Amino acid sequence: MLEQSFADGFQVVNADSKQIYRYLDIGSAKPSVELMQHIPHHLIDIRDPWEQFSVGDFVKLADTACESIRSEGKIPVICGGTAYYFKHFYYGLPASPQSDPIVRERIAAQVQVQGLDWCYRKLEEIDPVSAKRIHPADGYRITRALEVYETSGFPLSSFSVPTEARDGMRPLIIGLTRDKAELDERIVQRVRAMFKQGLEQEMDSLLSMGAVPEWPGMQGIGYREFFVAKEHPSMDKDDISQLIIRNSRMYAKRQMTFFRSLPHVHWVHPEDTATLSSLLDTFLANH
């Protein structure tokens, strides 16, 4: 009943930073073709894995998708786990400097020559606040923070982020929650399923296309671990699997920390369809 309600009245706007990339199907847990035929999804397979995609790009395209969905008399559902996509869609973008192509290219060259670790250490020196918020493997956000500093002379963390919902937005925010033991076990099962579905073959295909660690699409969990293994030849498939599990658990913890900081979230177990249906009914009655 709940799935049919979605098919009839809703369309999904993807808010996962890896599902926007073509060819990243298994490692990003992209929805199946059948599901996307049943329930339309937006912002999936819109970039090649070597292309940059900023949070500003996401907000702009998500706004356009929402307008299109509403014009069809449907309700958009922003769905995914990339915290900073949600944050800036909800609150708006900080007033940091516009991207400068020349500065960006210079920093990209530094990454190529010096390595991402060197760039991260540089960020720790000039903007320790941002460095604490950014994962050392997150090449896009590291280079963006360095670009802001080089462009403006001020650290990215000094630019204020809005604290009120933009445009009077009043969304229904649903957070799906499980206890830690259940979540940990589901992560293990998901990683095992990814390997059974052909994650290694998907990675081989990407490597044959020229994939390198610096590609934005390669910096997500499920892909970057293969590059770690290339640097440590003693690592086998089980080691890569365990590293993905460990990184996924750490990421899930960071996700929950962020999402629990959002106001007005209704926390529901995914299998509690009665509560989910009730929340949707109340929301629809008021919109």
Image (tube, rainbow, N blue to C red):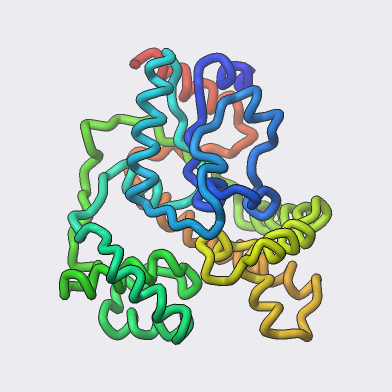
Q: Residue at x 55, y 52 (%)?
A: 48
Q: Residue at x 65, y 38 (%)?
A: 31
Left or right relative to 43: residue 156: left
Q: Is residue 147 above or below residue 171?
A: below
Q: Is residue 59 above or below residue 126?
A: above
Q: Residue furthest right?
A: 196
Left or right relative to 46: residue 55: left
Residue 120 in sight: no
Q: Position of residue 200 (x, y in %)?
A: 77, 62
- Quadrant for residue 252, please give it: bottom right
Q: Is residue 22 above or below residue 214?
A: above
Q: Quadrant of the C terminus?
A: top left
Q: Residue at x 80, y 51 (%)?
A: 197
- Quadrant for residue 168, please give it: top left
Q: Residue at x 71, y 29 (%)?
A: 34
Q: Position of residue 245 (x, y in %)?
A: 68, 65
Q: Position of residue 248 (x, y in %)?
A: 61, 62
Residue 47 in sight: yes
